[in-house]
Amino acid sequence: MITRKPFKEELDEARRIAEYQFNVRGEEFIPDDSVFVLSPRTFKLRMILVNGEKYLSLRAQDYRFILHLQAGRRLNQILPHPYLRVYVKPEYSVFIRGGGNLFSKHVLMADPGIRPEDEVLVIDGDEVIAVGRALLPGWEMVYYKRGEAIRIREYVGDKHGEH
């Protein structure tokens, strides 16, 4: 992998993708001091690092970002509630912090605008405890009591040792 500071045009393009996908101001979400990781074969963007940590990955097939915890925390600071958030029942958050996927019966509340395949924040109280991919629409996560709602990708107990 090739790691380097992005050109202004590359940073602007990444910010436009973020604006479209997450409905945020790109400059507010992707900092100027970001480092880009490029594919050595195609020289296309694969990942964005902030402060030396994974921040966002870019899916090659659809050119959408995949969230990592650091980016999820930043989104939690700048997005209005409950946008892109799924709130977990407090008694179940320990399982999510340990790496379990989130099932509908453990969802306390969810943004009704979430669509399947959206990147979402899993929240306990006001803390981001995981990021993942929605498998159901937000309104169904709360309505149904069976089935997997969120496929967790990264969680606070995951290689961060925070909790």
Image (cartoon, helix red, strand yellow):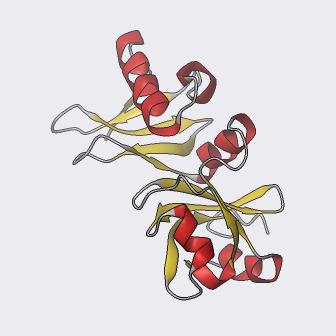
Where 52 sits versus 72, above or below? above
Give whichever of 82, 51 is nearer the camera.
82
Give the percent coordinates (x, y) of residue 19.
48, 28
Left or right: where does residue 144 sit relative to residue 160? left
Left or right: where does residue 68 sit relative to residue 89? left
Where 36 sits versus 161, above or below? above
Give whichever of 12, 78 is nearer the camera.
78
Q: Residue furthest top?
A: 8
Where 141 sits versus 138, above or below? below
- Residue visible at 56% across and 81% down in the picture: 144
Count of labels shown? 0
Where 14 sits versus 156, above or below? above
Quadrant placement of the N terminus: top left
Q: Residue furthest bottom?
A: 146
Q: Quadrant of residue 29?
A: top right
Give the percent coordinates (x, y) of residue 97.
70, 73
Give the percent coordinates (x, y) of residue 34.
53, 27
Q: Quadrant of residue 86?
A: bottom right
- Residue 156 visible to the viewer: no
Left or right: where does residue 74 sit relative to residue 119? right
- Residue visible at 36% across and 19% down in the picture: 10
Give the percent coordinates (x, y) of residue 162.
77, 63
Q: Residue furthest left?
A: 41
- Residue visible at 68% across and 81% down in the picture: 106
Quadrant placement of the C terminus: bottom right
Give whichever of 35, 99 is nearer the camera.
99
- Residue 155 visible to the viewer: yes
- Residue visible at 51% across and 38% down in the picture: 22
Give whichever of 35, 75 is nearer the camera.
75
Left or right: where does residue 98 sit relative to residue 118? right
